[in-house]
Image (tube, rainbow, N blue to C red):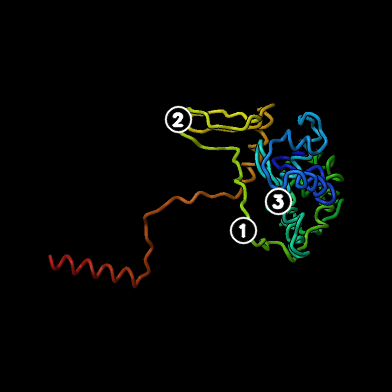
Amino acid sequence: MKVGSFEVPEFRLIPNALDILETIYKKRNRDKVNSKQIAIDLGYKYGTESHFYRRLKTLLEFGLLEGSGSYCVSELGEKILRPKDEHEKNICKTQAVLNVGLWKNIYDQYKKDVKEDNFWPIIVDITKISRDKAVELNSKLFKWYTDDMAHLDEKLVGVELAENTNDSKPPNPKSLRSGTGTQKPEVDEDMESIIFDRYTVILPKGDLKEEWETLKSYMDIKLKNYKYKKPSNVVLLNKKEHEKISHSITEEEHNE
């Protein structure tokens, strides 16, 4: 569900998302497959059902599934289903909850200390949606937030998972790719590439306008705190270094 520029999963991490993920993992392990194959694994007939896409987006928002067009269970998803111990599972659950952009923004400012009566002003402040809309969504979003936060261990916030050195992690396809020339890159059968000058945008087939708006919302989140650091050839010297170089230059000029 879209709230301002944020996508919020419509199913909770536990038990919903993990139950869905378990079904996929048992059938596919970490193999990459297209969305229709995943839909069939989950009992859908066509892979275009709106209920299926809400489940798919839930897994993507929690970071349990990765990809665009073709998907696979992420490393986080595998570890949360098959943890080596309870500590690793708790780290995974904490990371999954904070992968939800809106939840992370709320948690960074208010932690778990939120009340339903004053939750909607927080939503307005972070998402910039109207007050009426925030009041309308207040009960639902508050329940979703508190349900997911129940699985977050505050002592493990920021703790990184140990990487699997023996695992081969499938590449994460990018939805937006830069290219040169006008030749369309090879894409999956359920994806469509659109060329803009030197950029190629790759989106799922279907309602391109809706998919583009979704991609833009992700980029807004990605770029929210982004600052471009312009490369510089300027070297800052302390006083001692500056005097040393100046003395060297003076000697060279004198020798000439």
Residue 66's spot in the image, x, y percent? 67, 45
Which residue bears the numbered disc 2?
181
Which residue bears the numbered disc 1?
166
Residue 123's spot in the image, x, y percent? 77, 46
- Secondary element at image label 3: loop
User: Badge 2 local density, few (<14 within 10 Å), some, or many (20+)?
Assistant: few
Residue 2's spot in the image, x, y percent? 75, 38
- Front residue of 81 and 210: 81
Q: With 208 as the anchor, is 200 left or right in this view? A: left
Spatial separation of the CA atoms under disc 1 and disc 2: 38 Å
- Secondary element at image label 1: loop
- Identify the mark nearer the N-term, 3 or 1: 3
Asked which quadrant contains residue 244, the reply is: bottom left
Q: With 74 as the anchor, is 235 left or right in this view? A: left
- Front residue of 248 and 34: 34
Above or below — where is 45 with respect to 8?
Answer: above
Q: With 3 as the anchor, is 193 left or right in this view? A: left
Q: Which residue occupies the extreme bottom position in the image?
A: 240
Which residue bears the numbered disc 3?
99
Spatial separation of the CA atoms under disc 3 and disc 1: 25 Å
Judged by depth in the image, the label closer to the viewer, 3 or 1, is 1
Q: Amino acid at mark 2?
A: Gly
